[in-house]
Amino acid sequence: MNDESMHGLKSYCRLLINLVLLALVTQSCVGHSPEDTAVAVSDRAQLHKAELRGEDFILRVYYRFDKLGAPLRIYLEGDGRAWLTKTRASRNPSPKNPVGLYLAAQEHKGNVMYIARPCQYISFEKNPNCEYPYWTDKRFASEVIDSVSAVIDTGKKKAGAEKLEIVGFSGGGAVAILVAARRSDVSGIRTVAGNLDHRVWTQYHEVDPLRGSLNAADVAEEVAHIPQVHYVGSEDENVGRYVAESFRSRVGRDNCIKIEMVKGANHSIGWEQAWPDLIAVAIPDCR
């Protein structure tokens, strides 16, 4: 076999190898469903799985209660896969990248509970109230907030906790604020890329307003006494600092609230790596 033929054979072999590798990667991605991801993340963190009724919805939760009576930290997931395009809603809002769950998985001790948003992970047969407005226009509707708060009550009772801290990612940040405004047991709030003023957010992106939703900024004064920190990614082009600043302008006082920029993080990438350092820092002292 001459050199030219040998070179052609080697090129052909490389092509075959690349095609095989591409097929393996593609097959792996296709089989990696949102449910598979959630199970893998929760198993690694030794979190228990449950489905809890909260008013109109059954919600997926992952939890670990290490110390009866200790404070409970709640993690609220983001909006998930709400839209396929700007005009076409998704048929299933379960997140492919559950940032809220990744953050909860960083908790290696203490009482922690992650709560997915309504219609995420749970079959529609179990959740007959699930219709697409609940992950689009009505994602922050009053019945959504009631459902999450009711599930928090269940978790708080099981953990024997008196106080709780709420952490919300993206749209879960809005839910955290709206839930806290209705409760008297919240000792702290942290939001990560939180959509804290959806009116400002929709105007900025020139999309339809969320007419069926409550707006976290409207209850800013009601949570002004709660220590809170709002983390914003320096590279976040979805929910930028302008949203957090709009919320802060409605608080009426600033001794309980901080906005922290996190270098290198965009809306959904960079938070898992930064979280151990961020969660180790105390929230503001309101005194």
Image: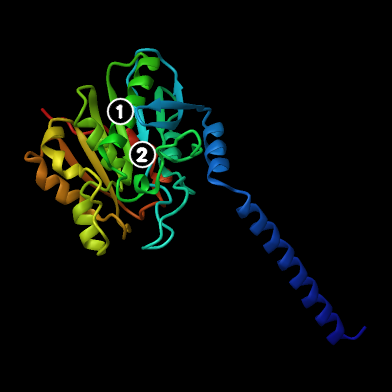
> Foreground: 218 or 76?
218
At label 2, counting other C-alpha atoms closer than 10 Å, the crowd grade (few under 14, some 14-19, many 20 or more) is: few
Sequence-first disc among 2 and 1? 1
Task: Name which residue lies at 51% across and 31% down.
Answer: 45
> Foreground: 51 or 87?
87
**Where does the image place residue 126, in percent across and percent down from the top left?**
49, 33
Point out the residue furthest to the right here: 1
Residue 178 appears left or right of 90: left
**Where does the image place residue 241, in percent across and percent down from the top left?**
22, 54
Mark drawn on residue 277: 2
Q: Amino acid at mark 2?
A: Asp
> Foreground: 58 or 176?
58
Residue 97 appears left or right of 168: right
Residue, disc 1? 149
Marks 2/1: CA–CA distance = 28 Å
Q: Amino acid at mark 1?
A: Ser
- Against 222, residue 21 (above or below) is below
> What secondary structure is found at the residue carrying circle 1?
helix
